[in-house]
Image (cartoon, helix red, strand yellow):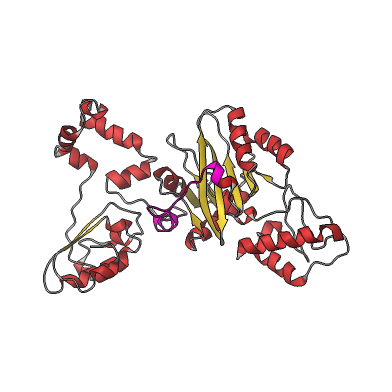
Amino acid sequence: MSSNPDAQAGKRGDRVLDEFALHPDPRKLYSIAYPGITWGGSLEIVSTHRGSANFFNSLGPGDPAQGKSQGFSLHRVTLQDALDAGFLAKLQAKLPADDPRQDMDEAAYFDFIKAGCPDEETFLQEYMCEPADDAGAFLTFELIDGIKYKPGEKMELTLAELSACKNPLFLGGDIGRVRDLTSFWVNEQVGGVNLTRKRIDLQGSTFDAQEAALYELLALPSMRRGCIDNTGIGRQLVERAQTRFGTYKVEAITFTPAVKEELAYPVRAACEDRSFRIPDDPAVVSDFRAIRKETTAAGNIRFTAERTDAAMPIDFGPRPLPCTPANQPVPATHPSSSDVPFPQNRQIAFKADIPPSTRRYGHAGVSGPHRAMQGVCNGKARHLFQRCIGLWEGGLA
């Protein structure tokens, strides 16, 4: 039957719910499927885990003394269990003769599978039946699954398609060289939703190659702003990009604890209201899951990210940057101030939506390398400033 929960309604008899935890709403699916065995039959639920907070993780034998038994028996098969039962021999019988797995024994195959996972958490959950801990993760699997592109949805656009794009584009960039990736992430803003449109990951590339890839994206006609990692080796790249494209278009981001906190909450808000779309890629999911919110001994909030050899640490790098409030459109030039008053209703709209670090007392403003836009503008710049207001409000609609 269809995975639509409503397809279960009114159906009697045995049923099997496969990959139950990956369903968009497992609780609803269970609540409709369970009554179907009232007149007899069995209900089997098979799935990999999807975080400790997933409804699937609450099912099981339970404790009858506490009234928590759903009557299920629990069966668990890990990768090691499957290998002990002869899985590898069955797999090798189906593989081509030149497949490298033909020469592996069980231990080598176990290590092969583990090495292919983006991180330890993914391996334990996908292959060892150990649900990932949602208590320590800033973003739960439920939130991340809700913003992934659905099968068949068009995600990535070519440079030619991006050049023809009329909607605002925003860029986030995290700079690495040897161990960490240099990663550029482009979003298209459509009706208030940030759609991932292009990802470029470079490892071990020369700075010339990184610069060429970045400039190609910044030169796109609809590119409004690029927020680039200004920490460590990224500084030279940011400085040269600002010289070529202007500080109004290239914003330097230094990942201090305060900046990470400013970036973190808008990212989670975007996940909660589903105004962000990401590819269904294990490496991307792993990066988002790596974000941890910790409380120090002094009671301060700190955001960290696990660093692994398999993937770059997100460290609030290219993924969150394009979808934060800092990505709102900026004018092509800086309006200068004079005695033309800023409309009061516009002022309120600005103050309500820009992050606290960019607010100015008594007027609207945008801080950063592109200077503050005051609540006044001269006659020549007035039409440009009004256009900026329209773009800003359009992006917040």
In the image, 92: left or right of 363? left
Whole-percent x, y for residue 355 in the image: 65, 59
Residue at the image position 72 percent from the left and 47 percent from the top: 248
In the image, 139: left or right of 110? right
Residue at the image position 51 percent from the left and 48 percent from the top: 197
Tally the marks. Answer: 0
Looking at the picture, does residue 342 appear above or below residue 47? below
Whole-percent x, y for residue 156 in the image: 48, 46
Name the residue nearer the viewer: 384 or 229. Answer: 384
In the image, 41: left or right of 53? left
Residue at the image position 48 percent from the left and 50 percent from the top: 292
Give the quarter of the figure containing the N terminus: bottom left
Whole-percent x, y for residue 99 in the image: 25, 28
The magenta region covers 139-161
* Residue 300 visible in the shown view: no
Looking at the picture, does residue 69 appear above or below residue 279? below
Question: Which quarter of the picture shows residue 172?
Answer: top right
Is 149 one of the magenta-colored residues? yes
Name the residue nearer the viewer: 351 or 394. Answer: 394
Whole-percent x, y for residue 77 in the image: 20, 47
Name the residue nearer the viewer: 240 or 180. Answer: 240
Is 56 one of the magenta-colored residues? no
Residue at the image position 80 percent from the left and 55 percent from the top: 335
* Residue 287 visible in the shown view: yes
View extreme (right): residue: 339
Give the quarter of the figure containing the C terminus: bottom right
In the image, 223: left or right of 310? right
View extreme (left): residue: 40
